[in-house]
Image (cartoon, coloured by chain):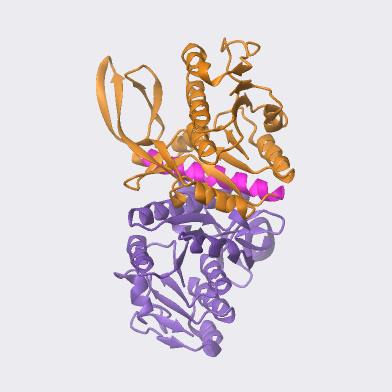
Chain colours: A orange, B purple
Amino acid sequence: MIVVKVGGGEGVDTESVVVDVAELVKQGRQVVLVHGGSHETNVISEKLGHPPRFVTSVSGHSSRYTDRETLEIFVMVTAGKINKLIVERLQQLGVNAVGLSGIDGRLLEGKRKAFLRIKEGGKRKILRGEYSGVIEKVNAGLLTMLLDAGYMPVIAPQAISYESETLNVDGDRAAGAIAAALNADTLVILTNVPGLLRDVEDESSLITHISQSQAEVYLDRYAKGRMKRKILGAVEALLGGVSQVILADGRVDHPVQSALAGNGTVVE
Amino acid sequence: MIVVKVGGGEGVDTESVVVDVAELVKQGRQVVLVHGGSHETNVISEKLGHPPRFVTSVSGHSSRYTDRETLEIFVMVTAGKINKLIVERLQQLGVNAVGLSGIDGRLLEGKRKAFLRIKEGGKRKILRGEYSGVIEKVNAGLLTMLLDAGYMPVIAPQAISYESETLNVDGDRAAGAIAAALNADTLVILTNVPGLLRDVEDESSLITHISQSQAEVYLDRYAKGRMKRKILGAVEALLGGVSQVILADGRVDHPVQSALAGNGTVVE
């Protein structure tokens, strides 16, 4: 059992990932694919006249402000466009995929973060009306039922709150939670760099191996921006019982099989 | 077991339908909800700079030309926006809904119509690049698996072709095919009129009852525009073993329970 996360950023070649996943399924592996979609959501949000708004948190990180309208666009694009294009392509490759959002069957459930603490013009502010959250429960039964019946789940990064509001969630951490809940052997997180780098400017500075006990040290020392969340997803998966997490390059041929062969940053 | 179709046109109150369906599920009925989304798709297509194109078929009917770009917008809006808003609302009402497009798990499969025969400027033309089709197979196993596990399926009107291309399909006929495949007792098709009318201008001219053997006569004589497809969906459901089909008003309170009480045009 493998969980694969393919990002929504530019540069990652979703086609290669999907072709590669189809080969693994035909070799008899059970695979769950989790995808993102932030880049495409930004493009369509602009066209629909509701451009994305990025804010700076009090801790200095840039993050997306997900108001209800942004959330609806996010769901439409990820669960409607990206998810179904992947399902269609997998069907063409002979894999009987079923696309779900985390809200379907309460697949991913968690706590809503209803406001953001931000810095704006030097002042601290509370920004309300946020619809994002952190996953606390996974409906593994729904996934195993589908897998056992021969379907391959393809999952868009939403969760449902305990009050049944749709939430935007981080795709890497969603993949981590799913891998843990399914007791997956391996979680592969594909990105547009070769893995965790000592120097983000130098792709040859790849860190090839991290033990679970060192993960937090590496997280603090080397992970920048979105890589932080990938390492967090990795740590959560390992704590949940996944044997290994591989952060690998999504821009190469056979990106998943390449990762499984050990190319990338192996965390275990 | 009831299959309910709620349209994508203006005027139908999806909120009432969803609330009503949730009550039926709590009473222990198994329900499958099929929805449309053509109106919302038209609105978003306009905003995205790819307005819908309507053509006149050689038989004189107006129909939508679904090129690949239109198809992708259609899927995005129906399977991504409308489907997930319904799933979220059902979850709020305590119903564990799972939203699917007809391409998921090859739920709805059929033959692609790759071109349209149209009339334009007095001339007959062939318009290629069409992505629509007619459903020939339903994966009832996937639906019964979900229903038996306590999930309520909510289905967006796409099908997958034998060559695994996504197709736009008519929602009423999709509901008919699903009702037949599941051996549903009743198919309720909600619309923005009280049912089949003798005179489309006069809502009091409701035809309250049609026997299956008369259906084609009524189809030819009274059904206009989109009502033709609803009657076709009804006939296909009855031929497939559904006991009764009710064409009813989606604009009233408790529209589904009202239909089940016999309000509307009962075809049996």
**In this image, A94 relative to A39: left or right?**
right
Q: Position of residue A147 (x, y in %)?
A: 60, 50
Q: Nearer the viewer, residue B167 or B205?
A: B167
Residue B44 shows up from this direction: yes
Q: Nearer the viewer, residue B201 or A59?
A: A59
Magenta residues? A69-94
Name the residue located 37 percent from the left edge and 57 percent from the top edge: B90
The overriding secondary structure of the stretch rendered in magenta is helix
> Total of numbered circles in the picture?
0
Image: A132 above or below B182: above
Q: Residue B256 sits in which quadrant?
A: bottom left
Name the residue located 39 percent from the left edge and 38 percent from the top edge: A70
Q: Position of residue A138 (x, y in %)?
A: 46, 43
Q: Residue B108 sits in which quadrant?
A: bottom right
Name the residue located 70 percent from the left edge and 44 percent from the top edge: A25
Q: Position of residue A98 (x, y in %)?
A: 58, 51
Residue B197 forms part of the magenta stretch: no
Image: A69 above or below A255: below
Q: Position of residue B245 (x, y in %)?
A: 47, 79
Q: Nearer the viewer, residue B250 or B46?
A: B250
Residue A82 forms part of the magenta stretch: yes
Image: A60 above or below B118: above
Image: B129 above or below A74: below
Residue B70 shows up from this direction: no
Q: Nearer the viewer, residue B44 or B262?
A: B262
